[in-house]
Amino acid sequence: MSAVFDNEAKSLTVTVTGSPPTSRQNTLLVGWGKLDQDTGPVFDTLASITGTDGGNTSIIELTSSSGTFVARAAMTGEDRNVAVGALADDTWALLGVYVPSDGTGDSTIRGYHDGTTGDVTYHLQNLATATIDELTVGTTPAGGWNGWSGKVAELAIFNVADLTEADALMAELATTTADAATNGTLIEYWPLLSNGNSTVGSNNLTNNGSVAFDADHPSIGGGGGGTVVPVIILHLMQQGIL
């Protein structure tokens, strides 16, 4: 199943407590998205995490611009984004953004769109944030007009050692669920099968605007359109239930 958004005032949100990443850790935000370009606006935000560091606000975001996937990271005084390929209409895609915490020199922000990557450099201290304060799914943190039109599933936040581990983790997530990945440290995981509950931490998402869930789900291991049955079986097998 997946969460369904239609570019209206709908979102899933949580104020993160209990297990947020701590200072100086590299962050990977990843999820599966299916964009409906028939109803979508020019800009569509699938998910974003916001945080604070020394009074500055930061954002790490999965979004699109006119149907092209864009990985974005910003902090007070600097905003960086990189386009990583066109999103096929009504087709599941594995999307991610890696943001390093090292602000001592030019560092690489990497966006992932299935097997394609794109990089942009930045020079910001602790953009991966001393804290992660909020996750917003389906729109920008402040809401507004640029909501996601389409579906979202298998959303997760990881800490990784470096860009090499982020690459290895993204390769894994094309064929497995976040809770079975061997690379990185899983911080929070929202499968979005039928609700916004986290299966790892305590940060369950609040449903704003009656976000619906349907039976469509990415076929993990191949992208494209999928059904919920194989994914549920995969979840149960990885948990040792089957």
Image (cartoon, grey):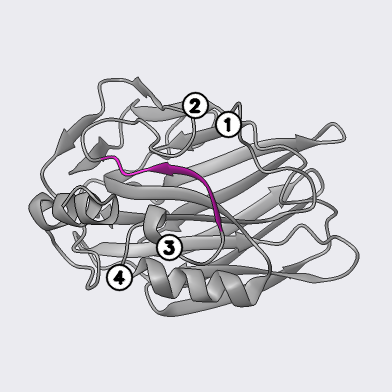
Inter-mark Cα distance, 3 to 1: 24 Å
- Image quarter (top left, top right, bottom left or bottom right) of the N terminus: top left
Q: Earlier in the sequence, mark 3 or mark 1?
A: 1
Q: Which residue is mark 2?
A: 14
Are discs 2 and 3 less than 8 Å apart at CB? no
- Amino acid under disc 2: Val
- Amino acid under disc 4: Thr
Main SS of residues in magenta: strand
Q: Position of residue 207 (x, y in %)?
A: 34, 22
Q: Earlier in the sequence, mark 1 or mark 2?
A: 2
Q: Nearer the viewer, mark 4 or mark 2?
A: 4
Q: Which residue is mark 4?
A: 175
Q: Which residue is mark 1?
A: 134
Q: Earlier in the sequence, mark 4 or mark 1?
A: 1
Of residues 184 and 151, the one nearer the viewer is: 184
Q: Position of residue 77 (x, y in %)?
A: 82, 48
Q: Nearer the viewer, mark 4 or mark 1?
A: 4
Are discs 4 and 2 less than 8 Å apart at CB? no
Q: Which residue is mark 3?
A: 181
Instruction: Specify the segment rendered in magenta.
Output: 185-192
Of residues 129 and 161, the one nearer the viewer is: 161
Residues packed near mark 1 inside 10 Å, few (<14), some (14 to 19) or many (20 plus) = some
Q: Earlier in the sequence, mark 4 or mark 2?
A: 2
Q: Residue furthest right?
A: 104
Q: Nearer the viewer, mark 2 or mark 3?
A: 3
Q: Is residue 197 above or below residue 179?
A: above
Q: Is residue 189 magenta?
A: yes
Are discs 1 and 2 less than 8 Å apart at CB? yes
Q: Position of residue 119 (x, y in %)?
A: 62, 75
Q: Secondary structure at mark 3?
A: loop
Q: Secondary structure at mark 4?
A: loop
